[in-house]
Amino acid sequence: MNSDSQPLANAQVTLYGKTSTANSNGCFKTQLADALPFTFVVAAVGYKPIETKASTGFYRVEAKLASAQSPANSQVEWVPITETEYRSAKPCE
């Protein structure tokens, strides 16, 4: 999402070296992985990308990208969820 909490369609999300594209609601879901590199990257045209160390386990990740012209920095929040919550989450539609 952008700094105004609006979804960012087509943002590129990279986790464990695998890149996917967020849908029109800014949603993405990856498969379980346990491989290097342990980084999480979100980037979108016109916004400041963010790269951070990936957390192991099950999380809902909220990334807020700051506009490229903004003095603010992009941010990411890792919200812990259970494995059951992860497995029952609906894929992005």
Image (cartoon, helix red, strand yellow):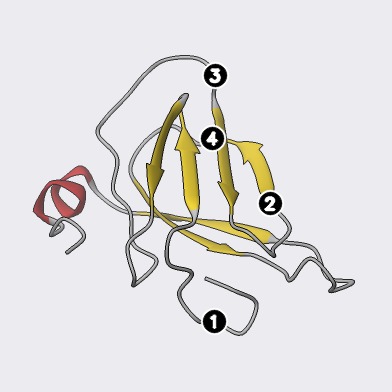
Between the C-alphas of marks 1 and 2, the distance is 16 Å
Disc 1 secondary structure class: loop
Asked whether disc 1 touches disc 3, contact meaning CB atoms under 8 Å apart, the reply is no
Q: Residue at x 16, y 55 (%)?
A: 91
In front of the other: 82 or 62: 62
> Which is more N-terminal, label 4 or label 3?
3
Three-letter residue code for mark 3 = Pro
Q: Earlier in the sequence, mark 1 or mark 2?
A: 1
Q: Which residue position holds label 4?
A: 54
Dot 4 lies on which element? loop
Residue 62 placement, left or right of 45 = left
Q: Which residue reaches farthest top?
A: 36
User: Which residue in the structure is indicated by mark 2?
Assistant: 49
User: Residue at left 34%, top 72%?
Assistant: 25
Labels 3 and 2: the sequence-earlier one: 3
Pointers 3 and 4 in contact (CB under 8 A)? no
Q: Earlier in the sequence, mark 1 or mark 3?
A: 1
User: Which residue is label 1 attached to?
Assistant: 5
Distance between mark 3 and mark 4 Cα atoms? 9 Å
Compared with 16, 3 (above or below) is below
Q: What secondary structure is found at the residue carrying circle 2?
A: loop
